Amino acid sequence: MARESVSKTFIVAIILAGLCSLMVSGAAIGLRSKQEANKIRDRKKNILMVAGLYDAKASVEEAFQQIEPRVVDLASGEYVGKDQFDPETFDQRAAAKDPKLSITIPAEKDLAGIGRREKYSLVYLVKKDDKLDQVILPVDGKGLWSTLYGFLAIDGDLNTVRGITFYEHAETPGLGGEIDNPTWKALWADKKIYDDQGSVQLHVVKGAADKNSPHQIDGLSGATLTANGVTNIVKYWLGDDGFKKMLERLKAGGA
Ligand SMILES: Cc1cc2nc3c(=O)[nH]c(=O)nc-3n(C[C@H](O)[C@H](O)[C@H](O)COP(=O)(O)O)c2cc1C
């Protein structure tokens, strides 16, 4: 074979491509467990943040000791035992896709646009002097371009919002992405979820909220479609098909 030939060039290129793909796939496999651990840590950090318990100087793992994760059966509102699902390892995202662990949501009820929902959900309790101080609920649903994943923190009175955060979405920065704006998120604190009849009234309006309304949040200018998505997520997850049964059980004095 000639010292410089087309076939030699191809052989070198193929060997190089093979080596590079081995390196890339090796790195992807090697880093997977680290990426998973980082995702879990990030989720815990978001739970601490929405609960107002995050301290940048303290370890997330240590701070998370203040939080008691439980798994709730959404149909009954009752917690399920660790023998059925361990909150430390329960994979809610996987459960939402598993036909055995999820239900199809009829179109007329599917406000959040998610198609299926998990039968069991994680919830996070914060207790003070053995009394429920707040409960943090995972929520998700469609925005304009993407599914928004977040947490809503509710006061121990089970009607007052403590905070909201979205830890994953792909809305447009500067438009729908303004759901991450701390100033907008701060508007949610102290708003009321339900009216006296127990119906979900909390919602994002178009434009400025009525200052006298306990249920209204300012709109996101140029991003009404994402904002409507947030309203629908709140309505779905705090309604009869979501966490309402559990919240009513707790309100009635259930542990
Ligand atoms: C490139 C592009 C990206 C957009 N991204 C968003 C978005 O993330 N969220 C959203 O609600 N609207 C987004 N919009 C605007 C919507 O199409 C729609 O006009 C807007 O939600 C209406 O809100 P407004 O009535 O407050 O203007 C985007 C528009 C364009 C052209």
Image (cartoon, grey):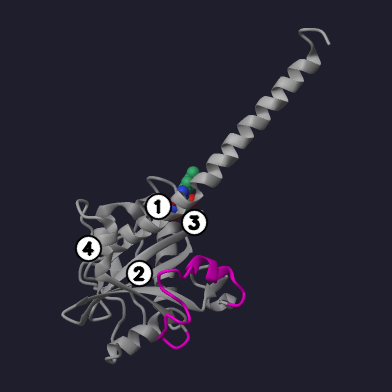
Task: Give the Cα distance between marks 4 and 2.
Answer: 22 Å
| Residue topped by disc 3 | 144
Q: Secondary structure at mark 2?
A: strand
The residue at label 1 has a CB less than 8 Å from ligand 1: no
Q: Residue at the location (45% across, 58% down)?
A: 225
Splitting the image into 4 quarters, where does residue 226 fall? bottom left
Element at label 3 = loop
**Measured from the top left, where is residue 108 in percent x and y?**
56, 77
Placement of the C terminus among the 4 image quadrants: bottom left
Identify the residue at image location x=44%, y=47%. 172
- Magenta extent: 75-100
Look at 45% across and 66% down and name the residue there: 140
**Residue kind at label 4, given as amino acid type:** Gly
Q: Secondary structure at mark 4?
A: loop
Closer mark to the observer between disc 3 and disc 1:
1
**Residue type for callout 1:** Asn
CA separation, marks 3 and 1? 27 Å
Pointer 4: what residue?
52
Residue 208 appears in the picture as rendered? no
| 9 lies left or right of 117 | right
**Which SS type dominates the magenta stretch?**
loop
Question: Which of label 4 and label 2 is nearer to you?
Answer: 4
| Residue pictured at 46% horizontal, 77% vertical | 85
Could you give the CA–CA distance between mark 3 and mark 4, rounded to whole angstroms? 28 Å
* Residue 13 picture quarter: top right
Q: Residue 94 colored magenta?
A: yes
Q: Distance between the Cα atoms at labels 1 and 4?
A: 21 Å
Residue type at tag 2: His
First reached walking from the N terminus: tag 3 or tag 4: 4
Residue under numbered circle 1: 38
Q: Which mark is residue 203?
A: 2
Asked if disc 4 and disc 2 are in contact, CB closer than 8 Å, the reply is: no
